[in-house]
Image: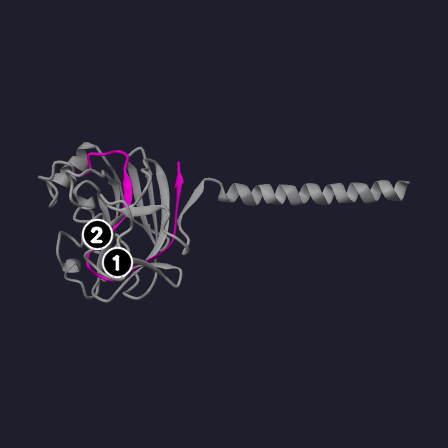
Amino acid sequence: MRLLTLTLATIAFTFSFACQSQKSSDKSKKGWIVLFDGTNLDQWKGYNKENVPDGWEIINKELVLTKGGDGDIITKNEYENYELELEWKISEGGNSGIIFNIKEDPKFNNTYETGPEMQILDNEKHPDSNQGKNGNRKAGSLYDMIPSSVKANPAGEWNKVKIRIKDGKTQFWLNGQKTVEFEMWTDEWNELIADSKFKDWPGFAKYKKGHIGLQDHGDKVFFRNIRIREI
């Protein structure tokens, strides 16, 4: 009887430990929503369109813009406070971007009319790397507003991104290093806009909640492992 009791106790302990381990594992994943895992585009649509444009394709479990000119894609859902993670690589001489706080409305023809952008660029061969002010059009920058302090991997190599937004306080990360940090809708923010190409754009950066977009700038670009967690 004693041996049976010890055996049952051992089984109970093992089962309890396994459950605790599973709970810890589940907790570490809690809150993350997969936006793209290489199998489908169910979380995406074209900007001001019902479906994903034909130029965006899944190839080898990567989201690829194979044909420019079909338009940007956006998340079907809107987000306000969150962490976004993804990986990108750009073609030689290529340009793209990650755009956020996008307002989808027929009165706006493009995502960038309302949404600020984290720049994606081949810094070595695209002319934007030498335009703007202090490098604020290079990869990892808040496009045309704040230059990145981090060197991106070159064309054809993957770069890992994190964007964190909480009550307007925003951080961009590239390959584990913070590139820029800023707070939206402050006096300093308004000054940045006034000193940028967006100064006379009536809808730019006016919305505190919106869609997240991937830009069709006409150049081949690749994305993978896209996920988001609201905070």
What x and y, as percent, mark residue 145?
17, 46
Q: Compared with residue 117, is residue 155 higher up or lower down, i.e. above or below?
A: below
Q: Compared with residue 224, is residue 170 higher up or lower down, i.e. above or below?
A: above
How crowded is the residue under tag 2: few (<14 C-alpha within 10 Å), some, or many (20+)?
A: many
Q: How many discs mark residues in the rendered view? A: 2
Task: Give the residue at x 51% y 44%.
Answer: 28
Give the residue at mark 1.
55
What x and y, as percent, mark residue 141?
23, 51
Nearest the eye: 173 or 156: 156
Query: Does the residue at mark 2 contact the one at mark 1 (Cβ under 8 Å)?
Result: yes
Instruction: Please give left or right for residue 158 compared with residue 215 in the image.
Output: right
Q: Quadrant of the N terminus?
A: top right
Bounds of the magenta span? 204-231
Is residue 61 on the magenta stretch?
A: no
N-term-proximal mark, 2 vs 1: 1
Nearest the eye: 147 or 82: 82
Task: Give the residue at x 54% y 43%.
Answer: 26
Q: In which quarter of the image is the C terminus?
A: top left
What x and y, as percent, mark residue 64?
31, 59
Q: What residue type is labelled 2?
A: Gly
Residue with the most extreme front position? 50
Q: What residue type is labelled 1?
A: Gly
Nearest the eye: 76 or 94: 76
Label ID, residue 71: 2
Q: What is the CA distance from the residue labelled 2 to the residue labelled 1?
A: 8 Å
Task: Give the residue at x 49% y 44%.
Answer: 29
